[in-house]
Amino acid sequence: MELTAAWVAFPLVLAALCVGSGLLVERLAGRALPDPLIPPLGCAAVIVVSQLSTLSEGTAELSAPLTGGLALAGFGLRIRPATRRFDSWAIRAALGAFAVYAAPIVLSGEATLAGYMSLDDSATWMALTDRVMEHGHSLAGLAPSTYEATLSFTLGKGYPVGALLPLGIGAGLLRQDVAWLIAPYMATLGAMLALTLWELARPLVDSRRIRALLAIGAAQPALLYGYYLWGGVKEMLVAVLVASGCAIAARSVGWGARRAVVVPLLVLALAAMDSLSSVGAVWMLPALGFAAWVSWPAAKRRLRPGTLALALLAATLAVPAFAMAGFISPTRAAFTSGTELGNLLGPLSAAQVLGIWPAGDFRLDPDLPYLAAALMVVAVAGAIGGAAVAVRRDTPGPLLYLIGTLAVAGVTWAIGSPWLGAKALAIASPAPLLAALGFAGRLAESRRLLAATAVATAVGGGVLWSNALAYRDVSLAPRAQLAELEAIGHRIAGEGPTLMTEYEPYGARHFLREADPEGASELRRRRVPLVSGELLEKGDFADTDRLRLGGLVTYRTLVLRRSPAQSRPPSPYRLTWGGDYYEVWQRPAGSRWDVLAHLGLGSRTEPGGVPRCADVRRLARKAGPNGALAAVPRARTHVYPPRELAHPPGWGAGAYAGKLVPATPGALETRVSLARPGVYGIWLGGSVRPQVDVLVDGEPVGSVRNQLNNRGDYVLLAEMRLTRGTHRMAIRFHAPDLHPGSGGEPYPIGPLALSRQDAGDTRVARFLRANALRLCGRRWDWIEALPSGARGV
């Protein structure tokens, strides 16, 4: 049901909004526009209108009904006959592109999102979308938190949010969390891109069937597809707006400076500026400049009052785009610094603009580089051939799109940062593909089937090869884990401040937003120091025993990842909820912190340990004559470091000390000796991509696939009852298969842990000061010194 809501209901709702709004733009233009351009124009109109409504907190929640009303008005005021239908082959092109973009998520069987371990910007997009749709650009009333800090750093500095507004409106209408709709939104933009490319290719290829195949192929260049799998909302949207602008500008050759050209171009340009600030205007310059150049002879003879009115209206509507961020984006430093890489490993190759890059991660060199280079040479020749066909057939649209976008991308590449240059290459990458595949289509129509087949196979095959590798290596978010955070967020709303001790930006920036969340290793307002006084680095994890009491006491609620290494939080906290992935610990509102000292035992991999008697005596002295000691008994966790496990020789050492990298199919094997029977959880540190099976004494007991974790987290492989004695255990790693995300660079793994007691299964025991030495020589999670009359134990 969730998959259906995300991938059927949302695209249909968004399509209805965009088509209706596009028909209204067509009405304002005063002339029937090409059918395939109606949805992109409508999407731009939705952005322009909702950008205005979300400027004020008082009108932000009216955005959805306002845009819905405009869409209905568009259907009612359309200037085309009601019996007119979109070309079926254009629709097939859109559905084909949509299917390609949907495949990595839909074929996983879960309504999730991509780019989980690659780039965490999607968590920020969620935070921005939620806030803008409910409160506009106001940050009033937000308590200090990671959520608040994220918004202050972006929205508070005027970060452009236009690209997120259709997503927020669709989510509001369906009452779905935006987290599950980001991927369907971008896939719908991919469908709109295919529609626009279908229209641009009309003068190149007469056959509607060939043009549909051409549009599907050109709509999925490898670099843009890679950004889609990273959550690149803006790159997808701007690619649609730029292509649509070129298609409209080409109409000025026959229509002149009429409303039919001016109105759509202004809507597209305004949407681009709302999405990228001034950079959006730069991307629209080729289309605007071409339309102005073609129309200038007629315009200078007679400057119509309507044209001046439109110019004034456009200037007024452009004010919001610059009023918030100024003429340049607030993140300008990341755009102009020659060393700013963002999440890149190094500057990308300019050749990636050709749309072919057969590598699972576009930041890496291609697989089979010589073959990839040969395919790119064919793509260059095909693009030149497509440009020649456009010149010969006297059609400006494809030529304007190719030259204009490459010019903007080239300038950006030359003067911008590598991070900005990569985005520019992605936005421009459909243009060379369109020209090359258009050339192949024209060859086919000219009966030069051998040449057509060669070009189409090289270019189209290169694109499919590239995106098949990206599909294989996609980093999919663990849906069930994030869904638990969504449920927890509703449960603890208003019961903050809240702390997460793992790095989980989707929790701290989005799902727990109503509980004032902070991540110990995230952007935050409070200091959360370790016992050593240091702060966690971004992306790191810390057990609660590693955090100073003074920092921990600030938080009423703790949302902790289940783990064999997780200690029970200090005594005033109580377990209020437990799930498969998380536990929620809270202390009553207004309760005192009756702890004089807290001694954490154990290590990074095992929560319990045996205290030194000297430490016990020290705690007893801290408690005072009438005080007490509190302690948590903790069963031993059986921990097996990778070096103690039998493993294939090719796995080698991992990126972190003591880890292994499962580079080939194979198994970890060991014998475990258990002194006590019970239900044990079998845990593996790290992440799992392809399927992993667990066998105990030769019998399969569990199976896991595609469970990605941040640093310090574990995968629960199975839970089962084990008898006392020795057992043979094997963790079998499969090879990548047809499931999305089953390939890619393997993550370091280890250790293997068997635990029969989670933090939530523990109980706090209390000892009088006189009996303190009874704590010596026994295994405890931690020990605390409590004053006389301490509560909460």
Image (spheres, rainbow, N blue to C red):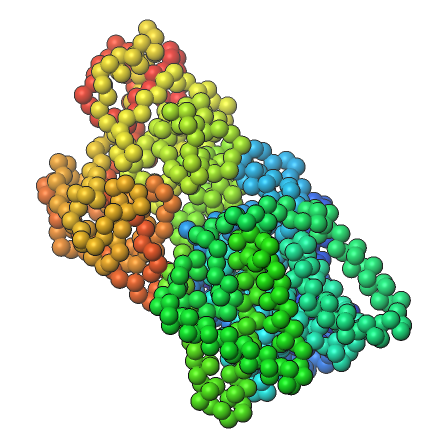
Give percent across and percent down for residue 521: 44, 37
Q: Nearer the viewer, residue 50 or 220?
A: 220
Q: Is residue 698 left or right of residue 294?
A: left
Count the labels in the image: 0
Q: Nearer the viewer, residue 74 or 793?
A: 74
Residue shown at the point (32%, 6%) measured from the top left: 625
Give percent across and percent down for residue 77: 76, 72
Displayed quadrant of residue 298: bottom right
Q: Nearer the viewer, residue 233 or 38?
A: 233
Name, please, the residue furthest toward the bottom: 447
Residue shown at the point (22%, 24%) measured from the top left: 610
Residue shown at the point (48%, 28%) measured from the top left: 527
Give percent across and percent down for residue 389: 60, 83
Residue shown at the point (39%, 64%) measured from the top left: 366
Q: Is residue 542 left or right of residue 279?
A: left
Give percent across and percent down for residue 417: 55, 52
In this rendering, does residue 234 appear at all? no
In this rendering, does residue 548 appear at all? yes
